[in-house]
Image: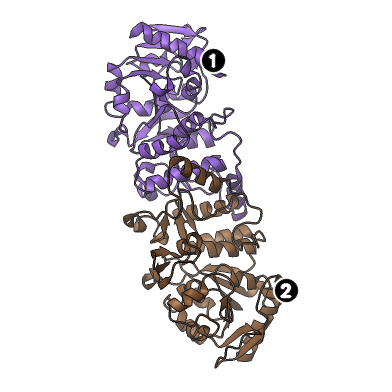
Chain colours: A purple, B brown
Amino acid sequence: MVTFLSGGTGTPKLLDGAAAAFSPEETTVVANTGDDVELGGLFVSPDVDTLLFQGGGVLDRETWWGIDGDTHRTNAALSDIAAAAGLPDGPQYLSDEKQTAGRDIANWRRFSGTAEFMTIGDRDRAVHITRTSLLDQGLTLSEATQRLAGAFGLTIDLLPMSDDPIASLIHTDEGLMHFQEYWVAHRGEPTVETVEFRGSSDAEPAPGVIDALEDTVVIGPSNPVTSIGPMLTLPGVADALSQSTVVAVSPFLGDDAFSGPAGDLMEAVNAEPSTEGLATAYPFADAFVVDGSDDAEFDRPTIQTDIRIDSPDDAARVARAVKSAIDIVD
Amino acid sequence: MVTFLSGGTGTPKLLDGAAAAFSPEETTVVANTGDDVELGGLFVSPDVDTLLFQGGGVLDRETWWGIDGDTHRTNAALSDIAAAAGLPDGPQYLSDEKQTAGRDIANWRRFSGTAEFMTIGDRDRAVHITRTSLLDQGLTLSEATQRLAGAFGLTIDLLPMSDDPIASLIHTDEGLMHFQEYWVAHRGEPTVETVEFRGSSDAEPAPGVIDALEDTVVIGPSNPVTSIGPMLTLPGVADALSQSTVVAVSPFLGDDAFSGPAGDLMEAVNAEPSTEGLATAYPFADAFVVDGSDDAEFDRPTIQTDIRIDSPDDAARVARAVKSAIDIVD
């Protein structure tokens, strides 16, 4: 049994070849939900969705979000209507009082849907509507995710990290904004001052998460701050990780992140914005998998391989390196 | 100045030719909102939408709802996901406690969006998302409607009947159901026992409605019970109508309704399910426009013409008859 901790791009890429080393039937994936938002009344869970679409064989692998070949009729019409009605584009937060008035799970991350600043596809949207409706019918996010995982025919066991609201908020020189506004609307350009996981002090890991962390844990090449960071704030998670075998795959090639704003965010939390920073970010890690060209030095076992993942074959190579690292420390 | 009271089919059909007798710039249309529902988190206002799409020149005139040429990708995907997840199709009310927990305007008519029992098009959906978001931003339904009317370039002045929730609930031999469940999901087949406009005792007419009723009022060939009936329950509306010139166009050809379940519903409220019943339904009417073949007798002036409307020319003919009736009683 193995458990992957996943954001929305790096770790899903690794999972594309994970079967070379780990049986999908014996794999659990815990997904970040700090990036989730409520947009125009719909609860969107981007990292969970990427894993659903990947598991269902429908993921758009150019973008690593959305459904391959999806249309965007509603999203385009929202822009048209907003333009015709003189409504602003870009992210529009609902008022402060609305931020905690509604579904608890959406607290502190509620956006108006006018002009819809995130590009949601037409089939993609049906997932958000179904999830939102299941939440409104009284299911937890875990339960709704399980129903969707069944619909998409997932072989792995997919768990959101929590059924409680945890909002990844970025304090920047341009003000406080949710991660999706920082990343989607501002392309990660504002200077990051600090990162806040609002709600984490009152949140619990979702059912099954702590149990899953008793298995060997793989931290994929996801953003240590905003993809893995929110999980580490949940009570019991760091403790569980310190007692399990944990292998972390670097999301850096030297000082460069593969994807996303990992470097800037690492600096904001006072970690080295490079592979070396992983030792700070993941003190519980028992071994690391880093790039063959990386001269980072660790006091823990380290496997080097070509960690760039552009294909399932690449992913299989990295997965085998992860397995080697586990075998060394287990 | 003239004010039309409108449901979702008959009166919009008449409006297609109304310019033959009434200047669009001097026309106000008050739309029924008793049929509105919240579906999968989105607030849908079917009669308002038909008037928006008609005014914007994009209405699907085969169905008299939705946007001409619209696709239905999300709606189809919702069915696919529901089938794959083992979720039921057909209308799924949210729990009793959820019915009054959320946007007030949606009270007593909240449905899960799983399997989406109403067929919502992809461009159509953008209107619902925009409306819902404007409501969540703090606009009233009137204000949101005005923004949408601007976006669609409406010439007429379109007012929802109320900014408060009024839910048209049908008590049937198969249980209590919202009008949309009765009509869309059950095709008007259950036996109607009574009709309830829940919320009407606490509701107010929307801003501008009572003023608009001081002008000459035309009640189009809409369902007297569920399209016009909800308006008549609003405080001040019946009084205003009794003081204005009111001409009603029959929605019946003898005992047959043009469209919709008008006949069964008239019986349920103890009115004759035919043209004669209009005298009961509209005691404040000063004149009627009925079909040339209709032998109904009224104690008020009556204009006969061919009232079937299959084209803008038909609509123009009926509009001119309405104008003649107004001229007689004014």
**Closest to the observer, B305 or B40:** B305
The answer for which chain carries disc 1 is A
Left or right: residue B184 versus residue A302 is right
Q: Residue furthest right?
A: B313
SS at mark 1?
helix
Q: Residues within 10 Å of mark 2 (few under 14, many from 20)?
A: some
**Closest to the observer, A219 or A211:** A211
| Residue indicated by mark 2 | B313
Q: Which mark is residue A314?
A: 1
SS at mark 2?
helix
Type of amino acid under label 2: Asp
Quarter occupied by the N terminus of chain B: bottom right
Residue A173 seen by the camera: no
Return the x and y of residue A317 as percentages of the image width and height.
Answer: 51, 12
Q: Residue furthest bottom?
A: B299
Residue A36 seen by the camera: yes
Return the x and y of residue B207 as percentages of the image width and height.
Answer: 48, 70
Return the x and y of residue B153 as percentages of the image width and height.
Answer: 64, 61
**Closest to the observer, B260 or A191:** B260
Q: Is residue A5 above or below residue A89?
A: above
Return the x and y of residue B193 as percentages of the image width and height.
Answer: 40, 73
